[in-house]
Image (tube, grey):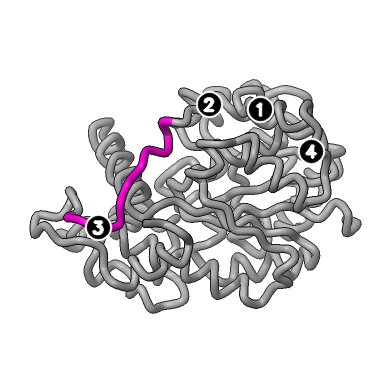
Amino acid sequence: MPDDSAPLIILAPPRSFTSVVCAMLGQHPQMFAFPETHLFAADTLRHWRQLCDEASYPMADGLLRVVAELFFERQTEATVEQAMRWLQRRSHLSGGAVFSLLAEQSGALIPVDKSPSTVYEAASMERCAHWFPQARYLHLLRHPRGYSRSVLHTLDHCRRRGVFPYWLWHLAAQGPERPDASTAAPRSHPSKRAEEASSGPAILDPQHSWLSLHGNILHFLRTQDPARCLCVRGEDLLRDPQLHLTTVAHWLGLRTDAEAVEAMQHPEHSPFAGPGPANAPGGNDPFFQKEPAVRRTRAPEVSLTGALEWRSDNGGFQPEVIALAREFGYQ
């Protein structure tokens, strides 16, 4: 892949506006946004398939949908079946090789990927840097209070539907199962089976995963050229999309005319904005798939001070969380 078409990789924990922001960027006439491919989570496509088989959520859906869309021209149950066979025949390829095939088929100048699993392990981000040395990185932020509320709201939604997504529990749980905030990466990959989380009760406080995952990202970005890295607060982008989308496009060296910026304000036009066919309905945040249009109410004003409503002890944010959030410009 030539340098001028190096990918844009969105680095952010889950529940950090990644679906809506990625879809917005993908509507720029010089970009094409993928759903969650998770291609950087594994060395080869065969390994990727193993992770998908172990996952407690439909991890394969995003890649199946983008292959169906790009190589078979539409997303139907039949083309998803074709996509499955297409991927099986390429199981020996690296995730980077498959990513390059998708990018070439899209004809886009800049492919955009936002798979949240990329930030769980340093190895995933290192694969990306190895496969695409000129990749650009958008570090997407969300206030720790808004992030924590979203994680717990989604976990409650899943429980009411009788679903137990291990990766989401892993983000919410505090205790022996949760990584210490000072570690470089969580000890467990989010694709582990749900029954592994049944060892006992856990205190739910997602501030710890917010801290550890942003720590992973910052540790990785220190090894990259600062000119290829941009940090954006998701709340700012959603409240003033015209200003901040223009900033991102300018940083990438892309068009910033009114037509291009207006197009980015319509993520609902993405071919992956809504649910996919019955055999691959996911690949994006289900709440986004239900209401993909930009809504400024996605980003209400919140504070770093005061008790956290999800804690029974009326505790607040840890000093380390407050310090990092303030470095990001949050109050």
Q: Position of residue 115 (x, y in %)?
A: 57, 50
**What type is the residue that disc 3 sits on?**
Thr
Report the quarter where the C terminus lies. bottom left
Lower position in the chain sequence, tag 2 or tag 1: 1
Mark 4 → mark 2, Cα distance in angstroms: 23 Å
Q: Are marks 2 and 1 in contact (CB under 8 Å)?
A: yes
Q: CA distance from mark 1 to mark 4?
A: 19 Å
Number of other residues with Cα within 10 Å of mark 4, as a class: few under 14, some 14 to 19, many 20 or more: some
Query: Residue beneath label 2, please?
Result: 292
- The amino acid type of the residue labelled 1 equals Ser
Q: Residue 50 appears in which quarter of the rendering? A: bottom right
User: What residue sits right under mark 1 in the picture?
Assistant: 270
Asked if residue 302 is among those painted magenta in the image, a careful observer would answer: yes
Q: Which residues are magenta?
A: 297-307
- Mark 1 and mark 3 lie on one chain; the one further toward the N terminus is 1
As measured in the structure, the alpha-carbon distance from the residue carrying label 1 to the one carrying label 3 is: 37 Å
Give me the residue at 58% from left, 60% from top. Answer: 41
Q: Is residue 271 left or right of residue 259?
A: left
**How many C-alpha atoms fall within 10 Å of the one at disc 1: few (<14), some, or many (≥20)?**
many
- From the viewer's perspective, is residue 38 above or below residue 300? below
Q: Give how far across and how far down residue 60 sits, in percent.
A: 56, 43
Figure disc tally = 4
SS at badge 2? loop
Circle nearer the N terminus (3, 2) = 2
Q: Which mark is residue 256?
A: 4
Q: CA gap, disc 2 to disc 1?
A: 9 Å
Image disc number at residue 305: 3
